[in-house]
Amino acid sequence: MVSAGTVYLVGAGPGDEGLITVKGLKLIESCDVLIFDQLVNDALTGRVKPGCEVVRMGKGPELKDSVSQDEIETLMVERAKSGLQVVRLKGGDPFIFGRGGEEMERLHAEGIPYEVVPGVTAALAAAGYAGIPLTHRDHSSVLTFLTGHEDPTKAFSQVQLEELARMGGTLCIYMGMRTLESLVSRLLAAGLDPDTPAAVIQWATLGRQTVVRSGLSDLVSSVESAGVGSPAIIIIGKVAGSPNSLDWFGRKPLAGQRVAITRSRNQAGELKQRLESVGAEVLELPLIEVRPKMDSTTVTEVFAGLSSYEWIVFTSPNGVNYFFEIFFKAFKDIRSFGGMRVAAIGASTAREVQKQNIEVDLLPEESVSESLAEALIETGSLPSANVLVITGNQNRDVLARTLEQKGEAIVDTLQVYETIPTDLEQLPEAKDFREHGVDFITFTSSSTVHHFYKRKAELIPDGGIMPTTCSMGPITSKTLRSYNLPVDAEAKNQSLDGLLEAIIDVVKADQ
């Protein structure tokens, strides 16, 4: 008989992937089955190990593929009884209006081992990111969480708004947007001052977060004017009147901006982190997939003569990572790398080299092949020198050709990876892009432009609006223009920081 696996009821937090607990993240990365809610950040689901079963369980009357609570619980039980480790990932905290109690009771009844990992509940996060202190020595010593969407089958309501209005303090209402008008009317009828400060925070902690503030009596009209809807948290009480100047998240340079990254997933992380740090909501749209690809005979020949090379040239971070991956399969000691000097095409590539505890001897001022070739030639070390260039399948041959023709070097190229198109039909982010769009789209290489152009009709339907286009540098911009695609912004400094600055400059110019 197979021993039952454990089910972990894990709170994912409200949206920002960084708000999940360390324990919760470790469980996601090690589980056999991940069952997650509609509002869970997709970035968390991408952290699972290879082979993990990932199941999205949409729930709610507005969803076409809505799944019943019983179906969710049955799936958890079935997978656990098969001996699998299951993470049931829920938005916010499992026990704050998350039906975690019901799921725990079902697991207990079925004899399934379970653990609960709390999460940051939406009200705490929404208030924190809007600069609203839920408690304050001068304004509120009472804090109440309540739902605006009770089970309609209950004989009577457990939410006695009239008593809460008389008690005062801070009210945090979950799932209350559909009944907002009724909630406000009942609170006013119970004697709450019409000027009581109120706020609605939609998409809390994400780049698209929107905060609407008004007096209680004007809240419904203010929300309608702003076009704000679910998912949102409603906060009512004196603390909601905190000054807008305390809204630290809303003051970030890219707050309210949605940016698409077209890099492969294994390259998107650093750019995504930088964009989110300045308030943007990031949509990863990996139009390309990068994977190892090399000829074993060529690898053997190169490694056999590794000590004969005077220079090794890395043209991308991917090239660095895949080269050292195969290097350490062939050699156990970094000293086998020998005494050859190292050149890298840009700062991000150089950083990957330095992670191997190897210093970069040459870094050109511009992150393009032409500049790297000229910088190498200017060292005066190339005539008759053996040079190894690490490439992918779509690298331009201008670097090797220039080193041979102008530098009189003897150049070998070693392809260690290939770039292939991503299957958009299997990419949830592509559907998100089509249906909701973005404000900016970034291109960090010519290969991302090529693949976008080939699939532009799949991503932007006829009559659709092309987002503001941002290019990493002149080579990428040239490729964009060759396809008659706009170049709305170009990084002055060909780096991720330069790209970020270019986007911020566009936003500032529009303000």
Image (cartoon, rainbow, N blue to C red):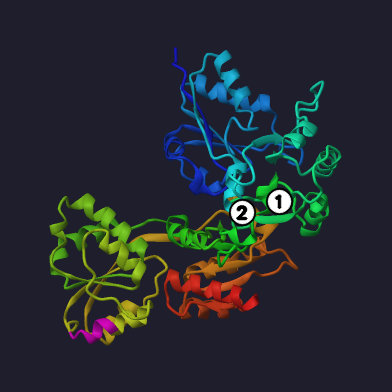
Q: Nearer the viewer, residue 92 or 196?
A: 196
Does the CB distance between marks 1 and 2 fall below 8 Å?
A: yes
Q: Nearer the viewer, residue 288 or 9?
A: 9
Relative image position of residue 114 (x, y in whole percent):
49, 22
Q: Residue at x 59, y 54 (%)?
A: 131
Residue position for label 2: 130
The extreme front residue here reads 138
Whether residue 16 is visible here, answered yes or no, is: yes
Report how many numbered discs are placed on residues in the image.
Answer: 2
Magenta residues (range): 375-380
Query: Residues under labels 1 and 2: Cα distance?
Result: 9 Å
Relative image position of residue 424 (x, y in whole percent):
59, 54
Describe the element under mark 2 as helix, strand or loop: helix
Q: Is residue 29 left or right of residue 76?
A: left
Q: Quadrant of residue 389?
A: bottom left
Residue position for label 1: 199
Identify residue type, mark 1: Ala
